[in-house]
Image (cartoon, rainbow, N blue to C red):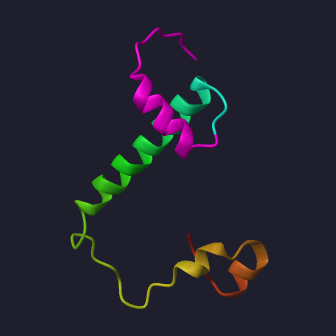
């Protein structure tokens, strides 16, 4: 954690508090940063749309099988 002093727009803070369940400015800023990161991450994912090739017949659910069940089905990682 790092300590930072910043000047915030009071109107933006009021609007953000109305839309959030945050009780403190610290909670509000943390929530806003998490949402910002998530939104940018989704945006970056959209850039690769249509560029990934999937193997036909690939079954991602087999990766969820563990231990002896995996051995019975002869499933490798």
Q: Residue at x 39, y 22 (%)?
A: 9
With respect to residue 34, does 29 lie above or below? Answer: above
With respect to residue 57, does 42 lie above or below? Answer: above
Q: Is residue 72 left or right of residue 16?
A: right
Q: How many marks?
A: 0
With respect to residue 10, does 42 lie above or below? Answer: below
Residue 54 figure quarter: bottom left
Q: Position of residue 47 (x, y in %)?
A: 22, 59
Q: Position of residue 13 (x, y in %)?
A: 47, 29
Q: Where the C terminus falls, by quadrant? A: bottom right
Residue 17 figure quarter: top right
Q: Position of residue 50 (x, y in %)?
A: 22, 73
Q: Position of residue 64 (x, y in %)?
A: 65, 74
Q: Residue at x 46, y 45 (%)?
A: 35
Residue lying furthest bottom: 57
- The one of 28 and 77 positioned closer to us in this rendering: 28
Taking the magenta stretch, the answer to whether it contains residue 54 is no
Q: Residue at x 60, y 80 (%)?
A: 62
Q: Where the N terminus falls, by quadrant? A: top right
Q: Is residue 76 left or right of residue 51?
A: right
Residue 25 figure quarter: top right
Residue lying furthest right: 68
Q: Which range of residues does the magenta coloring cover?
A: 1-21
């Amino acid at each position: 954690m790092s300590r930072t002093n910043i000047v915030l727009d009071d109107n933006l803070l009021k609007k953000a508090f109305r839309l959030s369940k945050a009780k403190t400015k610290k909670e509000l800023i943390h929530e806003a940063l998490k949402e910002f990161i998530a939104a940018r991450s989704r945006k970056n994912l959209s850039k690769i749309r249509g560029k990934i090739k999937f193997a036909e017949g690939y079954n991602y659910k087999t990766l969820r099988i563990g231990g002896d069940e995996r051995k019975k089905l002869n499933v490798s990682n």
